[in-house]
Amino acid sequence: MDSKPSPFVPPAPRPRTSPPSTLEMMRIVYRNPLELWGEPSYNEPWICVRGGVGGPLVVANDPALIRHVLVDNAKNYKMATVRQKILRPILRDGLLTAEGEVWKRSRKAMAPVFTPRHIFGFAAPMLKCARQFTGRYEDGKVHDIARDMTELTYDILAETLFSGEIAGEPGSFSHQIDRLFETMGRVDPLDLLRAPDWLPRLTRIRGRRTMAYFRKIVTDTMAMREERLQRDPDHAPQDFLTLLLRARGPDGLTRGEVEDNIITFIGAGHETTARALGWTLYCLAEAPWEREPIEREIDAVLAREPDPAKWLDAMPLTRAAFEEALRLYPPAPSINREPIEPETFNGLSIPPRAAVLVMPWVVHRHRKLWKDPDAFIPARFHPGNRDKIDRFQYLPFGAGPRVCIGASFAMQEAIIALAVLMSRFRFDTTAETKPWPVQKLTTQPEGGLPMQVTAR
């Protein structure tokens, strides 16, 4: 009698069994922060380090504590200093890094784009982009799926939020986004030590040319749309870009804030979904017993349901595999906060200026929260099981007031992309497919994801 294979356990750093030295820790944080975490981080409700490098540190794993920091007492927590030092040079006052009144204005300005009605309206262009993208595949060829998913999600972002009017070429863009995250998107050891800003960060110096490339894309994109709005305002696309440009004014956004939010969505808005799609295809390739029922589900839904806006609800197995990949490889592996005033939670003292880390990478693999936490088991997210997962033990899009505004957009995009890709092709690993998860703003597969693409 056939038995179901053991679950696939995808690659991940083994928890450390001893703490690193200060020098070793700084080296790990720069190279790959995912390799820093030890056994206590995966077993305890929280870790508190009083005298570490850069000041006090609290690692929050308990869902109740996470809820307290991100929701119940969110007003007492600001964005962490170290996080801002990494992201603000890239995104400035974009939605991910803005605080206070600037963040409130930006969030309010963008909310109309991400209502359910608008999200459903994006389904058809998402489908068109995914179908066009599959035209580049040839039966039996090996492709770097990590790079491909970056280009696909860029195409979708450009078509849906910018009506196809982003300056620059997708191929060049995917190369530059890798370069950006390789340089400016990493923790600099001086940030960890909370060194003054006037001390130059070598990583960011190397990334200035790449940053200039992205700023030029934004400048050219805005100029193209402004010219069109002046020339033919009645027929200009009513999309994200137009909405932002029209949100300028005394009570709205400044020109600089518009630029920052455009670069936030161009640079970061697609990257998280791209990484999650790549990891999903990789995990399914290594677990064909999970892939086969998903292929059957996709084939059945595509045969009976032409409206892609309905696919997310109609494909629970496909969605579950994507959500499980998001658990194992959360695109944003850390959420960083800092208390404004010291406080106590269930006996835990949180001192002023403490770095409070909510690490989805750790929480999603926590021994007390998940059974077989390191294994790829999409059934965790099947109907009936999904409701048993605490809202604050699964955080691929964050939580609280700063939850990702594009979460519904990303979920719909991912299911449509997977449905189109997997209905036409099968993605299999090769001898060269040896990804290693590395944290550079997002959880990236070092070495890429070379996979053989075969027509079904």
Image (cartoon, rainbow, N blue to C red):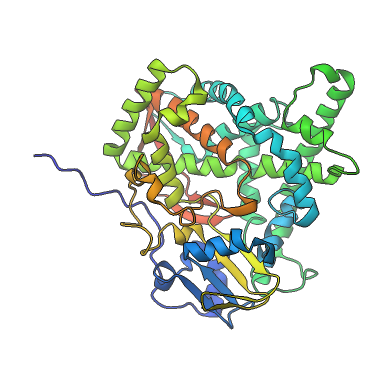
Dividing the picture into quadrants, the one containing residue 39 is bottom left
145 over 203 or under it: above or below? above
Residue 25: tell me if it is visible. Answer: yes
How many numbered discs, if any?
Answer: 0
Dividing the picture into quadrants, the one containing residue 385 is top left
- Give residue 30's position: percent from left, percent from top: 58, 65
Q: Is residue 205 left or right of residue 347?
A: right
231 over 35 or under it: above or below? above
Give the residue drawn at x 31%, y 57%.
371
Give the residue drawn at x 47%, y 58%.
361
- Give residue 130's position: percent from left, percent from top: 52, 25
Q: Nearer the viewer, residue 376 or 182?
A: 376
Give the residue drawn at x 53%, y 40%.
274
- Give residue 451's position: percent from left, percent from top: 40, 37
Residue 213: tell me if it is visible. Answer: no
Dividing the picture into quadrants, the one containing residue 456 is top left
391 over 367 or under it: above or below? above
- Give residue 341's position: percent from left, percent from top: 69, 74
Name the outermost residue toward the left. 1
Q: Is residue 132 left or right of residue 184?
A: left
Task: Look at the image and tell me in which quarter the N terminus lies.
Answer: top left
